[in-house]
Image: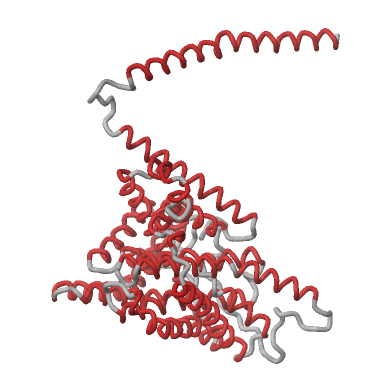
């Protein structure tokens, strides 16, 4: 019986293969050969005739989107395998798809993949991704609880911005003549200080989660320092952009910017409190209860409206989206649910197009290896690293944190990430810096974002090999109480968040 069944099964499979070859494969080959002959002899359509207007452009756009999304996902997975946050791989994918690699290695393929006709469409997707990302940044920073803020944490937070800003301002004195944009040296000085002072809050939270530092004193202090420092940096950046716009503006232009500043004050003050009370009365604070209460299109409409307003009054659209995130009350169920869904969609689908747009605007291969460029890049990289180590790190050690934790704190605050790329893009568009400085600062950003995770892992391995009698770097300093720095009230960040 078993032998008969096996023989019958084998015969049946051979019969199916034969039927498939006769009735599927052979007709497909014949049809394909006929179509190939017709296309070779007569082309795809009569001259001047198009069956579907714009079909070719739509196909090119969809092909480019498939390549961008696929490359971004693959690079993000590779970055995780290498011990880095996925955003590092996604940023590198966007840069490598631009003139830095693909445009130089295969210019014809690059031109066919990203023709001039689809670049405005890709830029539109990139701008949406940027706006929704900045909305999430505003949400993350506004959700940080300041009630338990202690003296040491406040000093560390202020030092995380003040010391790098001072270092950037000093460097700007020597670099302004060669690299300041049309906005002038004053705006260039403010911008360079902001660029060195930024810490990417979402990237920092991801690194802390992966290294198991989220619930340690150094992890909580670094999150709070990043939140306060970034909020101050965004205010300074908005001032620099407004000054750049006012430099060539008439009276009405300046009046619009003053009105924009007043509106921002109203948004962050009375309106935020009124929204909190209204949403609390209607939905309560339970996320599940109010999850369906705020439609996602309505939230997206509000974010885009704020971004459009700040862009119209002379500021960047990203600043308006940041304000929209900051003004919506944290802990509200309907807002949190809709914001999480909007952030997930933006992170997975829209942000790869922002990385592509950034990659198209920067050409790392065009950096000339002359002495001036090397010196400029080296000095800015040293300032970026040392001012975070000697600013918040040294301040934390002097105020009672252990030496090992203080060093970890300085290393963590060097993670500049995607937030820094957004700042650089704003500076280039507003004319605060020239393209060469933009490219140099991009290289500095990538370097300082890649370094924290491996450096911290190396510190942990060295701590485990230390003698048992020695206190590990993560132990509190003798006689110094562990300060409970607050956590973001929105809970831990999801793995896909940047």
In this rendering, does residue 55 appear at all?
A: yes
Figure check: 463 above or below 87:
below
Q: Residue sitting at 30 percent across and 43 percent down? A: 117
- Side of 125 where 475 appears, left or right: right
| Quadrant assignment for the N terminus | top right
The single residue placed furthest to the left in the displayed view is 251
User: What residue is shown at x 14% (from left), y 74% (from top)?
Assistant: 250
Viewer-nearest residue: 302 or 346: 346
| Residue 443, horizontal then vertical, whole percent | 49, 66
Q: Can residue 293 be seen in this view?
A: no
> For the point 55% across and 68% down, which residue is it?
204
* Image coordinates for residue 120, horizontal then vertical, percent: 31, 49
Q: Which residue is drawn at 72% across and 90% down?
A: 478
Q: Which of 87 and 287 is in front in this view?
A: 87
The percent position of residue 7, horizontal first and vertical second, equals 79, 9
As rendered, which of 221 and 282 lies closer to the eye? 221
Q: In which quarter of the image is residue 458?
A: bottom right
Picture mark count: 0
């Amino acid at each position: 019986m078993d032998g008969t069944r096996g023989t019958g099964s084998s015969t049946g499979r051979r019969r199916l293969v034969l039927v498939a070859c006769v009735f599927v494969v052979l007709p497909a080959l014949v049809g394909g050969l006929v179509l190939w002959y017709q296309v070779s002899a007569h082309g795809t359509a009569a001259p001047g005739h198009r069956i579907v207007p714009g079909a070719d452009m739509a196909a090119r756009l969809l092909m480019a989107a498939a390549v961008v999304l696929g490359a971004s996902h693959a690079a993000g997975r590779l970055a995780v395998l290498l011990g880095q946050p996925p955003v590092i791989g996604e940023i590198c994918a966007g840069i490598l798809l631009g003139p830095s690699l693909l445009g130089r290695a295969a210019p014809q393929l690059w031109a066919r993949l990203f023709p001039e006709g689809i670049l405005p469409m890709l830029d539109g997707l990139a701008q949406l991704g940027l706006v929704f990302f900045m909305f999430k940044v505003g949400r993350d920073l506004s959700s940080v609880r300041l009630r338990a803020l202690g003296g040491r944490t406040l000093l560390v937070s202020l030092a995380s911005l003040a010391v790098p800003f001072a270092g950037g301002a000093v460097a700007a004195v020597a670099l302004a003549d060669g690299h300041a944009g049309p906005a002038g040296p004053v705006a260039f000085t403010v911008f360079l200080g902001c660029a060195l002072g930024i810490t990417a809050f979402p990237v920092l939270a991801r690194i802390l989660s992966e290294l198991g530092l989220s619930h340690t004193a150094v992890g909580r202090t670094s999150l709070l320092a990043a939140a306060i420092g970034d909020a101050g940096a965004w205010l300074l950046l908005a001032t620099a952009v407004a000054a750049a716009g006012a430099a060539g503006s008439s009276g009405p232009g300046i009046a619009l910017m003053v009105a924009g500043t007043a509106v921002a004050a109203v948004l962050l003050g009375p309106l935020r409190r009124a929204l909190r009370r209204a949403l609390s009365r209607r939905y309560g604070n339970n996320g599940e209860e109010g999850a369906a209460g705020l439609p996602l299109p309505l939230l997206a409409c509000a974010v885009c409206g704020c971004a459009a307003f700040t862009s119209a009054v002379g500021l960047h659209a990203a600043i308006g989206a940041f304000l929209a995130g900051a003004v919506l009350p944290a802990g509200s169920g309907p807002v949190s649910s809709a914001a999480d869904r909007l952030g997930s969609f933006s992170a997975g689908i829209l942000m790869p197009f922002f990385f592509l747009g950034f990659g198209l605007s920067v050409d790392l291969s065009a950096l000339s290896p002359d002495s001036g460029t090397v010196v400029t890049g080296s000095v800015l990289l040293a300032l970026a690293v040392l001012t975070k180590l000697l600013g918040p790190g040294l301040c934390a050690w002097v105020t009672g944190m252990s030496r090992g934790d203080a060093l970890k704190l300085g290393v963590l605050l060097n993670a500049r990430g995607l937030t820094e790329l957004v700042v650089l893009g704003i500076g280039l568009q507003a004319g605060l810096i020239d393209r060469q400085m933009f490219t140099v600062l991009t290289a500095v950003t990538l370097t300082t974002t890649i370094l924290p995770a491996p450096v911290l892992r190396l510190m942990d391995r060295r701590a485990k090999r230390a003698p048992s009698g020695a206190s590990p770097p993560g132990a509190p300093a003798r006689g110094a109480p562990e300060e409970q720095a607050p956590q973001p009230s929105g809970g831990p960040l999801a793995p896909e968040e940047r």
